[in-house]
């Protein structure tokens, strides 16, 4: 009890001193004047565990970027968008500091207090189903994974805040020092005062950021605060958030892996070279280069009309699937997340009015990989963040996996825009096990995925005389049409597109036999559309559709194919005759 009284007295005395120095009371920062509260979580052990949260540093950076997206998303509906000035997220080299990386964005909602931002396992977004961040560990997880020291800076209407995430400060309890500085106070003086009062926490962190020089560390922090206050992109924003990741621990450049047919998805012009900037170390350049290259594929609803993303000062063109999927078609289905009593009701889930929250399925043929197996991509939340993908998903969807069935670059995009899918904490996978009827939800989802995929592919297979060769050739040749179509129509983002749709599809259930990769047959109850019913379905083509397979004329190619086949047959016949003559001569001899 005496010890508690001493701590309380020290806190009161520190509060008075801090108030005189322009620093907020100790209830909003942790240092000697406000000892870390007892916790069942071991600080150093928690930090070490965070190091194993992400399979790749890119996903750690994406976790931080998710927070920026969530915070900035609704800014697009306010005055900035009306003035044709979409809000920005900047990801760049920390050229003022140690050559690490910083992310800066304005926030559409008031930024929470720093104490709440750095509190472990608490999230201000846990009840916001549209937000991608939801577990209260994102910033801590990601920063610990990328660096031993990260700084969090915020600007609100009445104050600045500074928080520290540092490995060397973690002991028996998690310890993330934080301070709040009044807007009227001198930032340099207030940080310097805290470093003098708390040399083993604030002093250590700021000196480390200054490469061993306390004054340089404070100067670097002040430069960031000044940009947040007076920079052209941030001066009019009441709430601005910055996170600085110093001296990256890992490199973003991936080891060269075995190349398969899907490794050719990226076009050379899609790559952003960030190495023309001499600032920063090679690890920062590698990670930002990979981040910029993959960003358009990772967020299907993030576009320049809603939110502008700049990486190393270059605006990222977020168009991706829109410019490479021929016959891009949308299906929308209300997927039940629990048991359905009447199995026949399942067949009505693709028709409005929907009884359940809908999921959007986009299907098309990827012209950059016309011979590749079907590939499924799972996207979720309002931003359409890529959660996972599965190469050659035919077996998973109970589709014939032998030969070239369901190939031709068939691409399935599952757009969980209503946030129905349960995600794991690092957002690298789905987690149905934590839903009340998770297994049922998963089966219902795959039931429709399989049926829609079967219908879409067989519809186009039928239209190419049921020839897989002709379908492959059509997808290959469709690549030549994208450049002209893009110049003529422009590119409309998925979220605003008027795509191809099907109406009055005669869905049914049927037990069918399929063949797996090893040639073995199995029987499954599947969603099914008969061939005659496929052709009677109503297909509408939206004004924004860039390329349709029906635009591809294969007559010349087929004629050439027939000629070459005839020549090959004639050559084979001559060879057979020659062998026969030689055999006869040998027998006679």
Image (cartoon, grey):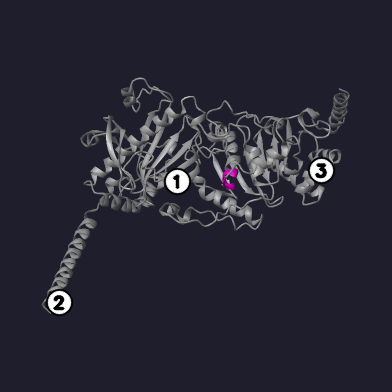
The span picked out in magenta is 55-61
Say the numbered circle drawn on residue 320.
Answer: 1
Q: In which quarter of the image is residue 444?
A: top left
Q: Can residue 410 be seen in this view?
A: yes
| Left or right: residue 466 compared with residue 90 | left
Q: Where is residue 219 in the image (x, y as percent from the top left)?
A: 77, 47
Q: What element carries label 1?
A: loop
Near-viewer residue (435 or 363)? 435
Nearer the observer: mark 2 or 1; the answer is 2
- Residue tagged 3: 203
The answer for how far apart the CA atoms under marks 2 and 1 are is 64 Å
Can you say whether 67 is above or below 583 in the image? above
Dot 2: within a 10 Å radius of its alpha carbon, few (fewer than 14), some, or many (20 or more) residues? Answer: few
- Residue tagged 2: 586
| Sequence-first disc among 3 and 1 | 3
Q: What element carries label 2?
A: helix
Return the residue found at the far left.
Answer: 588
Q: In which quarter of the image is residue 559?
A: bottom left
Return the residue found at the far top.
Answer: 341
Please state, as top left, top right, bottom left or bottom right, where the C terminus lies in the image: bottom left
Q: What element carries label 3?
A: helix
Q: Position of residue 97 (x, y in %)?
A: 72, 50
The answer for how far apart the CA atoms under marks 2 and 3 are is 96 Å
Q: Are marks 2 and 1 in contact (CB under 8 Å)?
A: no
Magenta stretch: helix, strand or loop mostly? helix
| Sequence-first disc among 2 and 3 | 3
Near-viewer residue (12 or 524)? 524
Q: Where is residue 462 in the image (x, y as percent from the top left)?
A: 23, 43
**Would residue 355 be counted in the magenta stretch?**
no
């Amino acid at each position: 009890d005496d010890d508690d009284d001493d701590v309380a007295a020290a806190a009161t005395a520190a509060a008075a001193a801090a108030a005189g120095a322009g620093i907020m009371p100790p209830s909003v920062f942790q240092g000697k004047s406000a000892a870390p509260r007892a916790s069942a979580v071991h600080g150093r052990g928690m930090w070490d565990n965070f190091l194993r949260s992400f399979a790749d540093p890119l996903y750690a950076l994406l976790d931080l970027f998710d927070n920026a997206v969530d915070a900035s998303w609704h800014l697009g509906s306010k005055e900035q968008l009306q003035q044709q000035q979409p809000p920005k997220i900047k990801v760049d080299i920390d050229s003022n500091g140690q050559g690490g990386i910083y992310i800066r964005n304005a926030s559409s909602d008031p930024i929470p207090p720093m104490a709440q931002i750095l509190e472990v396992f608490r999230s201000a977004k846990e009840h916001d189903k549209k937000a991608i961040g939801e577990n209260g560990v994102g910033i801590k997880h990601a920063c610990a994974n990328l660096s031993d020291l990260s700084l969090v800076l915020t600007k609100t209407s009445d104050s600045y805040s500074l928080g520290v995430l540092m490995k060397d400060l973690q002991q028996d309890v998690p310890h993330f020092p934080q301070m709040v500085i009044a807007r009227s106070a001198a930032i340099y003086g207030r940080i310097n005062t805290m470093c003098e009062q708390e040399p083993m926490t604030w002093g250590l962190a700021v000196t480390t950021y200054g490469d061993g020089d306390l004054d340089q560390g404070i100067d670097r922090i002040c430069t960031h605060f000044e940009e947040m206050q007076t920079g052209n992109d941030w001066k009019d924003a009441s709430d601005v958030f910055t996170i600085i990741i110093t001296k990256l621990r890992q490199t973003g450049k991936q080891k060269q892996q075995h190349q398969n047919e899907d490794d050719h998805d990226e076009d050379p012009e899609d790559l952003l070279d960030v190495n023309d900037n001499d600032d920063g170390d090679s690890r920062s350049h590698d990670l930002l280069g990979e981040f910029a290259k993959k960003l358009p594929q990772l967020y299907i609803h993030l576009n320049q009309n809603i939110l502008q993303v700049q990486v190393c000062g270059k605006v990222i063109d977020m168009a991706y699937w829109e410019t490479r999927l021929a016959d891009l078609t949308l299906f929308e289905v209300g997927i039940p997340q629990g048991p359905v009593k009447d199995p026949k009701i399942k067949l009505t889930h693709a028709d409005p009015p929907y009884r359940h929250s809908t999921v959007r399925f986009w299907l098309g043929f990827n012209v950059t990989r016309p011979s590749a197996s079907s590939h499924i991509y799972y996207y979720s939340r309002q931003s359409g963040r890529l959660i996972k993908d599965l190469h050659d998903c035919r077996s998973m969807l109970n589709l014939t996996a032998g030969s070239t069935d369901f190939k031709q670059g068939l691409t399935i995009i599952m757009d969980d825009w209503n946030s129905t899918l349960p995600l794991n904490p690092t957002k690298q996978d789905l987690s149905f096990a934590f839903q009340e009827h998770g297994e049922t939800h998963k089966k219902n989802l795959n039931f429709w995925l399989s049926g829609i995929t079967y219908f879409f592919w067989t519809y186009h297979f039928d239209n190419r005389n049921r020839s897989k060769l002709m379908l492959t050739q059509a997808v290959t040749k469709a690549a030549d049409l994208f450049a002209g179509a893009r110049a003529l129509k422009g590119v409309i983002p998925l979220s605003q597109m008027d795509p191809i749709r099907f109406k009055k599809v005669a869905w049914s259930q049927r037990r069918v036999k399929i063949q797996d990769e090893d040639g073995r047959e199995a029987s499954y109850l599947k969603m099914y559309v008969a061939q005659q019913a496929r052709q009677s379905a109503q297909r509408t083509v939206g004004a924004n559709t860039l390329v349709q397979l029906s635009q591809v004329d294969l007559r010349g190619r087929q004629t050439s194919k027939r000629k070459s086949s005839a020549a090959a047959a004639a050559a084979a016949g001559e060879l057979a005759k020659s062998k026969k003559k030689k055999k006869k001569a040998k027998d006679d001899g």
